[in-house]
Image (cartoon, grey):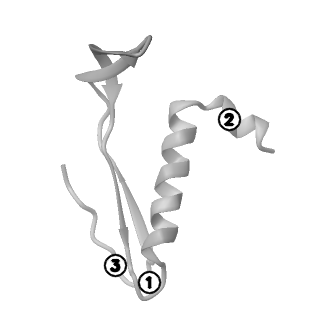
């Protein structure tokens, strides 16, 4: 995994890693199970002089929500 470096005049940069099948623990009917899911790492580098870390965290959480359920994008507009 890599972390992208911010160059002037950028204020943030989003790194997207390759989506791969991985074993993960999921909860099915209230019981934890091991399943194979497509997983992808994201990294967000911020210039904290310009962007607050909390704003960056909210952005990443919203992005993850939309990537996990793309239909949400259309219902919010």
Q: Is residue 15 left or right of residue 67?
A: left
Q: Position of residue 67 (x, y in %)?
A: 52, 36
> Tag 3: Cα neighbours inside 10 Å, few (<14), some, or many (≥20)?
few
Q: Which residue is mark 2?
A: 72
**Residue 33, placed above or below residue 2:** above
Q: In front of the other: label 2 or label 1?
A: 2
Mark 1 to mark 3 CA distance (whole Å) = 6 Å
The secondary structure type at the circle numbered 3 is loop
Q: Is residue 43 left or right of residue 64?
A: left
Q: Residue at x 27, y 23 (%)?
A: 25
**Residue 72, placed above or below residue 10:** above
The secondary structure type at the circle numbered 2 is helix
Q: Is residue 77 left or right of residue 45?
A: right
Q: Which residue is mark 3?
A: 7
Q: Residue at x 55, y 50 (%)?
A: 62
Q: Which mark is residue 64?
A: none
Q: In front of the other: label 3 or label 2?
A: 2
Q: Which residue is mark 1?
A: 9
Q: Nearer the viewer, residue 68 or 30?
A: 30
Q: Are marks 3 and 2 in contact (CB under 8 Å)?
A: no
Q: Are marks 1 and 3 in contact (CB under 8 Å)?
A: yes
């Amino acid at each position: 995994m890599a972390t992208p470096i911010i160059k002037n005049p950028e204020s943030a940069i989003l790194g997207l890693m390759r989506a791969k099948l991985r074993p993960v623990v999921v909860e099915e009917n209230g019981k934890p199970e091991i399943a194979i899911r497509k997983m992808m790492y994201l990294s967000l580098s911020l210039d904290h002089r310009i962007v607050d870390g909390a704003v960056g965290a909210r952005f990443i959480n919203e992005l993850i929500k939309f990537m996990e359920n793309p239909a949400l994008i259309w219902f919010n507009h």
